Image (spheres, helix red, strand yellow):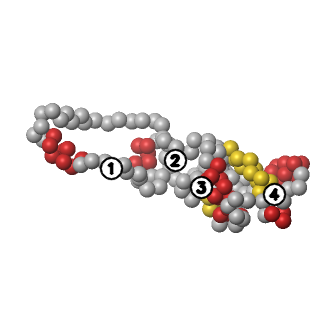
């Protein structure tokens, strides 16, 4: 598979040629080399051209709501009988309803770190990979490597 992602499988690993890149710093491919010098030379030869986007950028929650642009399917946590509480609030003076708006800048687990992984082939006859990864979720990285390279999960 050419798709990866820790929670949502939505990141293309090998970008098709001439496909628009959706953000600055997006990885666009993989370099395979026998030496560090070859890898650095190959990386220096990669040329990425950015142009002004055709659409207005989304820089805030308000912008996203106005553009009806959301990251995945909204997660809803429901517990108890909220409809019953609202109905009871109409006649129960002990239930206080506070109305207004709250804004919280932080986003829980909204890409907390940059992703960087180095995959070094191990013993060929054992079909192994040695992985060095900057991640909070090594199991997710292991699953992605298993799926993308098609090697056994434990290798």
Q: Is label 2 in contact with label 4 (beta carbons under 8 Å)? A: no
Residue picked out by circle 4 = 121
- The reply, left or right, for residue 59 in relation to residue 95 is right
Q: Name the N-terminal-most of marks 1 and 3.
A: 3
Local secondary structure at mark 3: loop
Can residue 69 be seen in the rendering of this structure? no
How many numbered discs, if any?
Answer: 4
Q: Earlier in the sequence, mark 4 or mark 1?
A: 1
C-alpha span from label 4 to label 3? 22 Å
Q: x and y percent of residue 66 in the render?
A: 39, 49
Report the front residue among 57 and 91: 91
Q: How far is disc 2 from disc 4 in space, using C-alphas?
A: 40 Å
Residue 84 picture location, percent across and down: 18, 48
Q: Going from the N terminus, do you reach mark 2 or mark 3 first?
A: 3
Q: Could you tell me which quadrant the C terminus lies in?
A: bottom right
Q: Nearer the viewer, mark 1 or mark 2?
A: 1
Q: Looking at the rendering, in which quadrant would you find the N terminus?
A: bottom right
Occupied quadrant, residue 10: bottom right
Q: Which residue is mark 3?
A: 5
> In the rendered view, does 121 fall on the left or right side of 133?
right
Image x and y of residue 67, in percent = 42, 52
Nearest the viewer among 115 and 28 is 115
Gap in Å between the C-alphas at discs 1 and 2? 32 Å
Q: Which residue is mark 1?
A: 78
**Secondary-structure class at tag 4:** strand
Which residue position is annotated with label 2? 57
């Amino acid at each position: 598979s050419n798709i990866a992602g820790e929670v949502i499988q939505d990141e293309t690993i090998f970008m098709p040629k001439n496909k628009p890149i959706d953000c600055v710093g997006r990885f666009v491919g993989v370099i395979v080399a026998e030496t560090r010098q070859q890898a650095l030379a190959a990386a220096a030869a990669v040329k990425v051209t950015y142009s002004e986007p055709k659409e207005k950028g989304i820089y805030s929650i308000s912008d996203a709501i106005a553009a009806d642009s959301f990251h995945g399917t909204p997660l809803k946590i429901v517990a108890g009988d909220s409809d019953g509480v609202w109905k009871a609030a109409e006649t129960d003076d002990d239930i206080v309803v506070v109305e207004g708006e709250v804004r919280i800048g932080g986003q829980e687990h909204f890409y907390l770190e940059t992703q960087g992984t180095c995959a070094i082939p191990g013993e060929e006859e054992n079909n192994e990979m040695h992985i060095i990864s900057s991640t909070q979720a090594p199991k997710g990285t292991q699953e992605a490597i298993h799926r993308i390279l098609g090697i056994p999960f434990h290798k």
